[in-house]
Image: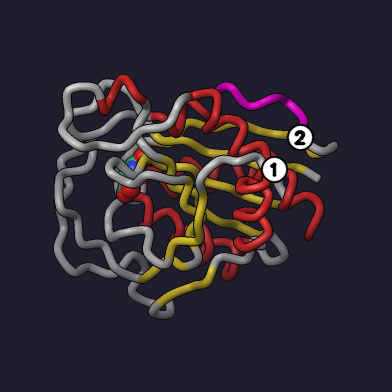
Amino acid sequence: MKILVTGFDPFGKEMVNPSIETVKRLPERIAGAEIIKLEVPTIRYKSLQVIEEAIIRHDPDVILSVGQAGGRSDISVERIGINVDDFRMEDNEGNQVTDEPVFPEGPDAYFVNLPVKSMVSRILERSIPASVSNTAGTFVCNHVTYGVRHLTATKYPGKRSGFIHIPYLPQQAAGKKNTPSMSQDLMVEAIVAAIEAIVETI
Ligand code: PCA
């Protein structure tokens, strides 16, 4: 099995993005699956273009995207992507859209087709806080959650995709009031556990 794991570049006022830092530190193989790592720009549509190019080049069985959710306290495995771009801030190319569809011809929403409950259980077994999330927001992470599902549903059948939001790193939370964070090592361990669940259950 081949798994494409993506992480985003830093956006907003942040100097790092824990998602790409975590993805970079994953082993080359997890539970026998080959891991392909990809950095994705935090940009509407360009994010999806870069992922689609990697799908064409590597033909992965699974596309798992990881993103920063500043302010969340645990590893959140997303259940659903919605057909809405409603950006609360500019992306890395200055796009800030309100109430636009991701793909006008697409359905309202897609459930991800990865075993979200098993992924959460495997992370919790390692005593790392995790939960299923029912919203990936309406910024670039939801755009990718929805967009990759739409791409695979319409152009690359048989592939599965999903999304995991992770908290800030401690260095990002330092100086922000009442802001949760998680260590780099724990976040790597959590993504490894989630991928083990994917390999075992699909
Ligand atoms: N988090 C943003 C986009 C990129 C990232 O890492 C989000 O939650 O939409």
Asked which secondary structure carries label 1, the reply is: strand
Asked which secondary structure carries label 2, the reply is: strand
Q: Amino acid type of disc 1?
A: Ile
Does 22 appear above or below 5?
above
Which disc, if any, is residue 3? Answer: 1
Task: Please report the residue visible at 59 percent of the width from the left and 57 percent of the height from the top.
Answer: 161
Lower position in the chain sequence, tag 2 or tag 1: 1
Front position in the image: 101 or 193: 193
Q: Is residue 28 part of the magenta span, yes or no? A: yes
Q: Do the residues bearing badges 2 and 1 touch, measured as CB atoms within 8 Å?
A: yes
Q: How busy is the neighbourhood of tag 2: few (under 14 within 10 Å), some, or many (20 plus)?
A: some
Does 110 appear above or below 125?
below
Q: Position of residue 33 (x, y in %)?
A: 80, 39
Which disc, if any, is residue 14? Answer: none
- Tell me the distance, in whole angstroms, between the alpha carbons under discs 2 and 1: 9 Å
Range of residues picked out in magenta:
24-29
For disc 2, the marked residue is: 30
Tell me the quarter of the picture where residue 142 sits.
Answer: bottom left
Task: Please report the residue visible at 28 percent of the width from the left and 54 percent of the height from the top.
Answer: 139
Front position in the image: 57 or 172: 172
